[in-house]
Amino acid sequence: MNFLNSFNLLTDGIITLCLTEQNPGSDEMLPFYYYDILDRNGTVGKISIRIGNNAHSYFNGHIGYEVDEAYRGRHYALAACKLVLPVAKAHDMHHLYLTCQASNAASRKTIEQMGAALLEIADIPKSCFFWRPGMEKYCVYRLDLCSP
């Protein structure tokens, strides 16, 4: 995969995503862009956008994010997710899988506010690279990406 340098810095005027890594991935992990999420005070979290599809992407999802506890409730995750959508589109992705633990109400709300449709609440199969004994069910959503 060829990474695109035009996505090194993304902003909506409130938050900025600053690229920290372009990871080529592996047999299990998709290639991904990894960003710090910044507001006017500094780093408030992190987000990644995984490019492509493989056997694990359905359960692992294409976007991963975390917002530092002190900054939660300000919709930074939602804003950051919206900012990485053009990255996926530029790599000719037509849909994304967005996933979270079934008990993670905040992530479920963020994903639903993105407009993603819940496909299922599922057990992670043992064949998935991040499976661990006793894992709780995951919500699997699909977000269709419209043409620009």
Image (cartoon, rainbow, N blue to C red):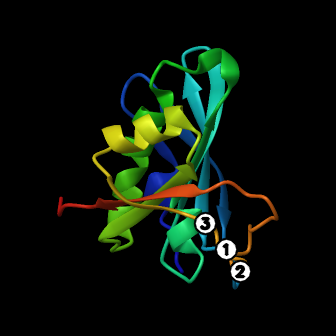
Q: Amino acid at mark 1?
A: Met
Number of on-image labels = 3
Is there a contact, CB below 8 Å, between mark 2 and mark 3?
Answer: no
What residue appears at the point 56 percent right and 67 percent down from the top-left corner? 59
41 horizontally vs 81: left or right:
right
Labels 2 and 3: the sequence-earlier one: 2
Q: Which residue, given by chain and number where applicable, does mark 2 sit on?
A: 26
Q: Nearer the viewer, residue 93 or 38?
A: 93
Task: Point out the frontmost of discs 1 and 3.
Answer: 3
Question: How far across and how far down the image is residue 1, in percent?
Answer: 54, 80
Q: Amino acid at mark 3?
A: Asp
Q: How far separated are the C-alphas under marks 1 and 3?
A: 19 Å
Q: Which residue, given by chain and number where applicable, does mark 1 sit on?
A: 29
Q: Nearer the viewer, residue 91 or 143?
A: 143
Q: Which residue, given by chain and number where applicable, does mark 3 sit on?
A: 123
Residue lying at the far right of the rendered structure: 133
Quadrant, the C terminus: bottom left
Q: Crowding at label 3, few (<14), some or many (≥20) Cα neighbours within 10 Å?
A: some
135 horizontally vs 114: left or right:
right
Q: How far separated are the C-alphas under marks 2 and 1?
A: 5 Å
Q: Is residue 15 above or below residue 134?
A: above
Q: How far separated are the C-alphas under marks 2 and 3?
A: 23 Å
Q: Amino acid at mark 2?
A: Ser
Labels 1 and 3: the sequence-earlier one: 1
Q: Nearer the viewer, residue 141 or 32?
A: 141
123 horizontally vs 88: left or right:
right
What residue appears at the point 59 percent right and 44 percent down from the top-left corner? 65
Question: How far across and how far down the image is residue 10, in percent?
Answer: 44, 41
Question: How far across and how far down the image is residue 74, in percent?
Answer: 48, 18
Q: Crowding at label 1, few (<14), some or many (≥20) Cα neighbours within 10 Å?
A: some
